Image: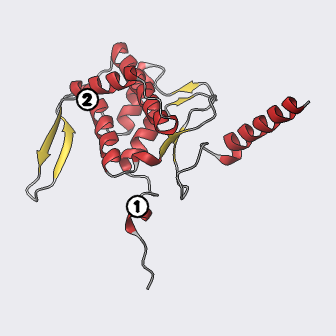
Amino acid sequence: MTVTNPSSETKRVATPGVDLIRAFVNTAELEEGTDHLATVEQARGWLQDRGLIGEDPLAESERLRLVEAREALRTVIAAGSDGRIDPESLAVLDGVGRNGRLTLAFSPDGSADLHPDATGIDRALGQIIVAAYTAMIDESWSRLKICGNHECRWAFHDRSKNHSAKWCSMQSCGNRMKARAYRARQEARS
């Protein structure tokens, strides 16, 4: 019989909340120059594909709020790696929570869930903030990182044992960044 420490095993698995946050942040593929929230139609489709909105219309101002929230989340996640938390990003996310009218509801079994009482885009963004809060509570948030390649900035789930991953992929960004560092050291020597 093998006994494992359940807490260390569960921290390696991405939760659905982390998956939603990662997918949301990764709607902008910086290296490829694509943005899945670039137009109202694309943003609406992305939200609908994830069940975050129904047939609600989406205005340009709402699409811009999605982009602003995405970049605020990217900044806050990156702060977990480098320790610099941007107050403006925190203010954006606080506003998303307020607009989502997050409430706590108790179930008959005594458990509690946080959920948005708003509608439309405020509800969709509220669900993303609830996912972030839940990930912070279950400690999966600490494994959510932003790629250290500033041309990439992809959100990824760090599956390393010691939480030390720096790049979204060793095969692409990791090799590229290590090669750059090597070249820089060689140039400094000559």
First-in-chain label (2 vs 1) = 1
Taking the view exactly as shown, the residue that stands out farthest to the top is: 61
Amino acid marked by disc 1: Thr
* Residue shown at 43% from the left, 86% from the top: 1
Left or right of 94 on screen, residue 37: right
Image coordinates of residue 10 in percent, x first then y, are 40, 61
Check the image and report above or below for 136 versus 109.
above
Q: Which mark is residue 97?
A: 2
Residue 85 vs residue 51, the one in the foreground: 85
Instruction: Answer yes or no: is residue 46 visible.
Output: yes
Q: Nearer the viewer, residue 162 or 141?
A: 162
- Residue 31 lies in quadrant: top right
Q: Nearer the viewer, residue 45 or 106?
A: 106
Q: Tell me the residue at 40%/42% (across/down).
A: 20
Helix, strand, or loop for circle 1? helix
Residue 10 badge: 1
Return the x and y of residue 52 as percentages of the image width and height: 31, 35
What is the x, y in percent for residue 57?
A: 30, 21
